[in-house]
Image (cartoon, grey):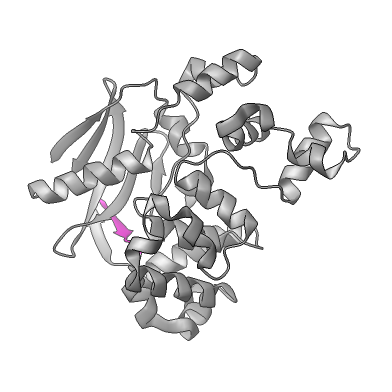
């Protein structure tokens, strides 16, 4: 076994950083809640796939692999894990707002507030597309089939894992394959468009600064844009969809719909952290 670590500067709730966002349920992520171990696959520079086991110990994220990595691959995985767990994001300003408003005060007390994301933006773009106009169980099934049919199988830590497919692999599979085997339906065309853009212009579509370009990907509407903004660490918007309306109207307006502007501006006092305030208010 080979272990390397990432020091944590801010309060950090490992279990909550994984389970506050449903991404932990989507392949190729595997969460062992009893042992507090998080497993998933990562690519290496020579196009191999390795499995990493992540856990928290002594104010550090510990990453364990069963194979020895080159220094470059180790640096890549440190970057992937830091990104997934938002290690480099500062949550102190959000915690200050929680205390100022005397709301969601358990978040700063327990080091909560992080929402899990994938190692790459391409994976998250595809997963967001899998959440549109469907039930969550179906999203889980589509992600599982996508990795099973198009990912690379690899063994590690006594079990079998599959990697998330590359854009090139998805393009090679084609729309008919996605529809028949992954059961992605009309989303198949959107997923292929995302893969095409990722392959042909990664600098435009696969950088955190590319948020404004995401809407050029077919199937990325207002809901998906808000979710992707959250993914890249922009929390200044909220998804005013049916779920948002149901929560705000039912919780704060006794089931009677307020004006459109009042509904949309309900979390404005949270400034740059509106999304986090809504998310943890809704799912607390």
Q: Is residue 94 above or below residue 39?
A: above
Q: Nearer the viewer, residue 6 or 267?
A: 267
Position of 246 compared to 135: left or right? right
The residue lying at 27 percent from left, 42 percent from top is: 53
The residue lying at 45 percent from left, 21 percent from top is: 92
Name the quadrant containing residue 222: bottom right
Q: Is residue 69 visible?
A: no
Name the quadrant containing residue 282: top right
- Where is residue 41? Give x, y as percent: 29, 54
The quadrant the N terminus occupies is top left
Q: Is residue 133 above or below residue 79?
A: below
- Where is residue 255? Give x, y as percent: 89, 37
Position of 76 compared to 114: left or right? left
Residues in magenta, as a range? 157-164
Q: Nearer the viewer, residue 270 or 31?
A: 270
The residue lying at 87 percent from left, 38 percent from top is: 258
Q: Nearer the viewer, residue 195 or 53?
A: 195
Count of numbered labels shown in the rendering:
0
Furthest toward the bottom, the residue is 176
Q: Nearer the viewer, residue 64 or 84?
A: 84
The quadrant the C terminus occupies is top right
Q: Based on the picture, tell me whether residue 159 belongs to the magenta stretch.
A: yes
- Where is residue 197? Give x, y as percent: 40, 71
Q: Is residue 113 above or below residue 109?
A: below
Q: Is residue 125 above or below residue 261?
A: below
Q: Is residue 240 visible?
A: yes
The residue lying at 53 percent from left, 79 percent from top is: 179
Name the quadrant containing residue 246: top right
Q: Based on the picture, tell me whether residue 211 belongs to the magenta stretch.
A: no
């Amino acid at each position: 076994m080979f272990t390397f670590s990432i020091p944590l500067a801010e309060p950090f709730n490992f279990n909550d950083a994984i389970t506050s966002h449903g991404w932990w349920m989507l392949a190729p992520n595997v969460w062992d809640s009893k042992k507090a171990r998080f497993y998933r696959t990562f690519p290496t520079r020579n196009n191999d796939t390795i499995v990493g086991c992540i856990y928290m110990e002594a104010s550090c994220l510990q990453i364990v692999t069963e194979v020895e990595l080159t220094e470059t691959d180790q640096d890549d995985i440190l970057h992937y894990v830091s990104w997934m767990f938002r290690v480099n994001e500062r949550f102190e300003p959000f915690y200050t707002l929680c205390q100022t408003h005397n709301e969601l005060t358990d978040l700063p007390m327990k080091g909560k507030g992080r929402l899990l994301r994938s190692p790459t933006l391409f994976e998250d773009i595809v997963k967001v597309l899998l959440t549109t106009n469907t039930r969550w169980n179906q999203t889980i099934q589509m992600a599982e089939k996508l990795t099973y049919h198009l990912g690379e199988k690899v063994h590690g830590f006594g079990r079998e894992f599959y990697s998330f497919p590359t854009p090139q692999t998805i393009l090679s599979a084609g729309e008919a394959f996605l529809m028949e085997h992954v059961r992605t339906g009309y989303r198949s065309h959107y997923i292929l468009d995302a893969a095409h853009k990722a392959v042909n212009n990664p600098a435009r579509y696969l950088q955190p600064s590319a948020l404004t370009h995401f809407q050029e990907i077919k199937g990325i509407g207002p809901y998906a844009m808000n979710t992707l903004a959250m993914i890249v660490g922009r929390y200044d918007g909220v998804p005013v969809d049916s779920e948002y309306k149901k929560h705000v109207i039912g919780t704060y307006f006794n089931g009677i719909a307020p004006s459109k502007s009042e509904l949309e501006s309900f979390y404005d006092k949270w400034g740059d952290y509106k999304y986090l305030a809504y998310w943890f208010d809704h799912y607390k």
